[in-house]
Image (spheres, rainbow, N blue to C red):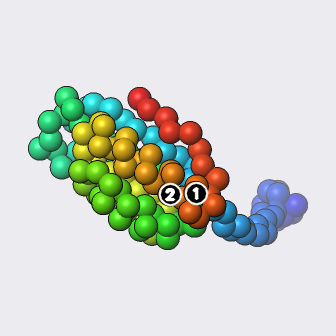
Amino acid sequence: MDFKNNLPQEEKIRIIQELVPGKQITLAHIIASPDPIVYKKLGLNPDLDYARAAIGILTMSPSEVSVIAGDLAIKTANVELGFIDRFSGTLIITGKVSEVETSIQAIIKYTKENLGFTICAITRT
């Protein structure tokens, strides 16, 4: 107690954070026919045919694999890179629903079979 102010003393909490990189894809999600506001809020191209468009979102570790995944995505199907972050492991791709799905499936297959990754299920809304 701080007897001068009659208040409890602040206790310092010591936190130790440790990053244990795994080889995994933790999110693989397809947003089919997203509302145009989603594109705008993500800073993506709003001049798309929204009725046939999709956004694919992946997160992976180690984060640098997002660069490989982005390259594989654009080589596999007619998609565009919306966002790629080699520090957080986030990849966002856009295109037609079938193209986004093809790219994500190729990324999942490659990372599982060639890199020995643990893979999550592909989800869709």
Q: Identity of the amino acid at label 1?
A: Glu
- Residue 11 in view in this figure: yes
Extreme residue in the left direction: 47
Q: Examine the rendered structure and indicate whether residue 104 appears above or below residue 83.
A: above
Residue 12 x %, y %: 78, 68
Residue at 36% from the left image edge and 35% from the top image edge: 31
Q: Residues within 10 Å of mark 1 (few under 14, many from 20)?
A: few
Q: Amino acid at mark 2?
A: Tyr
Give residue 17's position: percent from left, percent from top.
72, 68
Residue placed most toward the observer, 62 or 44:
62
Q: Circle 2 — which element?
A: helix
Residue 82 showing in the rendered view: no
Find residue 20 and report its image quarter: bottom right
Whether 69 is drawn above or below 121: the answer is below
Q: CA distance from mark 2 to mark 1?
A: 5 Å
In the rendered image, the quadrant that contains the N terminus is bottom right
Question: Are the residues at dot 2 and dot 1 in contact (C-beta closer than 8 Å)?
Answer: yes
Most extreme residue toward the front is 113
Residue under label 1, please give it: 113
Q: Which mark is residue 26?
A: none
Q: Residue at x 11, y 44 (%)?
A: 47
Q: In the rendered image, which quarter contains the C terminus? A: top left
Q: Residue at x 44, y 32 (%)?
A: 124
Left or right: residue 39 versus residue 8 is: left
Query: Position of 116 compared to 10: left or right?
Result: left
Query: Counting other residues with Cα less than 10 Å from the Cα at mark 2, is it few (<14), some (14-19), or many (20 or more)?
Result: some
Q: Position of residue 105 (x, y in %)?
A: 44, 46
Which residue was labeled with disc 2?
110
Question: Does dot 1 land on a helix, a strand or a loop?
Answer: helix
